[in-house]
Amino acid sequence: MTTDTQNVLKDEAEFLAGVEANFEAAKGKLFRGSSWQRSEADEVERLKGLMATHRRYDREALKSLPGNRRVAVHGFERAFLFWKRRTGVAIASVLTPLEHYASGADGEAPPIELGELMDHVRRLAGSKKVMHVIGVCSPSGFTEEARTARLDMPNATVVLAEPDGHGGWKMIATGEGVDPELLKLFDPEGSKAKIDRVREYVEERSADLLTGSLTASSVAGKVNLPEHLVRRCFETLDTSDPELRVAKKGGEMLLFRGAPVLRRERSSMNVIERIKQLFSTEGDEAEKINLLAERRATLAQRRDRIYEDIGKLEKKEAELLAQGKAATSSVPKRRLAAQLAQMRKDISRQNTTAAMLNKQMDIISTDIHNLTLIRQGEAAQLPDTEQLTEHAVKAEEMLETLKADSDLVSSLETGLEETLASDDELAILAEFDAPEEAPSATETVADSGATQREDARAAEAAPPAFDEPASGATEGDQKSRGADAEPT
């Protein structure tokens, strides 16, 4: 399964699930009726036929391809006694180029064209007596002709939906007078999901909050959401995160990082607590840090705007330089040279202003850093020198006492082992450890004589050997001995 196919299946499932949840919430409010009936359909059979045309019969591949699924909710209201009358139909449909996926072509799928969109809508809006509200989602997008077309149908209101490339959805009305509530109806991304998307973007840009700020207008352009929704998310972050702060400067809302301060309810404080807070200096550093951080955020916003202006001036400078090189007459060259010289002076002035703002921000950042260190040092509540010395002496005395107790216990265990043994056992233990004595010369000679006598007696008792002639015996002696021997 390719990445493009995976994204299409993900967008299809997300769109249908989100819109169906919106359908449930709109019953009885946006949808008229007392009872509703849900139905599902797809174009899997058509996809299977297209794959057979291309001689592709892989069932596993068929399961991994989009099938143009759709979900419909039919509204009814009671008429007479046992009759029901249809009040309307709401349809959420996914439209993909099935021919592209059936052929197994590589690359991303093409966008949906106007002709294919019109045919799809006509098939969905069957009955002309019932009003249809149709939302068509194309994961691969629509062509510009399809986006700008007016699909004014007498029995159907059509809303187009496509991914916006930022994790959200872009809703397009296909005619004039489309109710904005219908655009929200086919938006699968709820308000909570949109706020979560803003939170994720702020988390990604958290490093920029250390020395600068984020504006609601810039974030709204990056995540493709309304600015009022981003402002609401900024206010939520201000109340939920103790380090984030919000400030309004010149109609713009800034989000920056300040000092973490525990928020207190002033109304719940009694008179004594108010007097203590009035005469205490706790929290002054935090207020100074937040004030300086707000000033730094304002300077950062102004510096970023200057950088944008410098970029535009540099682009204009490059255009003037190219026109000067292409000019053939001296008159336009002089004019372009004067404009280019003035442009470069303006760029230099803007760079000087930006450098001054950077120095001011550096000074403020240094002061914030020093105040943060002071605040952190006071919050730690470290012991003074006298307490450290006193505790060190007590610890040393404790270690010496512990060592003396350990030595005493060792000596008592040794004495206990000695008392458990009797005098006789101690004498035998000493005998075990005594070295062995060497034998005397007399005992050695006696032992040698006894050994020789035992060897002689053993020789006399041994029988004569007949296997070999003795040394010095003649052949006749051997024959005589053989004659004297009795036959067996």
Image: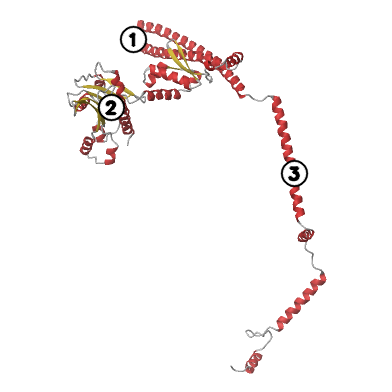
| Mark 3 nearby-residue class (10 Å; few <14, some 14–19, many ≥20) | few
* Front residue of 238 and 7: 238
* Front residue of 322 and 69: 69
Residue at x 40%, y 19% (from the top left corner): 230
Q: Which mark is residue 54?
A: none
What's the distance in space between the residues labelled 3 and 1, CA to CA? 105 Å
Q: Position of residue 290 (x, y in %)?
A: 53, 16
Precedes in sequence: disc 3 or disc 1: 1
* Front residue of 469 and 298: 298
Q: Secondary structure at mark 1?
A: loop
Q: Secondary structure at mark 2?
A: loop
Three-letter code for the amino acid on which mark 2 is drawn: Ser
Three-letter code for the amino acid on which mark 3 is drawn: Asp
Q: Disc 3 designates what residue?
A: 407
What's the distance in space between the residues labelled 2 and 3, CA to CA? 85 Å
Q: Disc 1 designates what residue?
A: 328
Q: Position of residue 274 (x, y in %)?
A: 58, 14
Three-letter code for the amino acid on which mark 1 is drawn: Thr
Which of the two discs, 3 and 1, sits closer to the camera?
Answer: 3
Determine the residue located farthest toward the left in the rendered image: 128
Based on the displayed image, in which of its 4 quarters is residue 186 positioned?
A: top left
What's the distance in space between the residues labelled 1 and 2, CA to CA? 52 Å
* Front residue of 345 and 99: 99
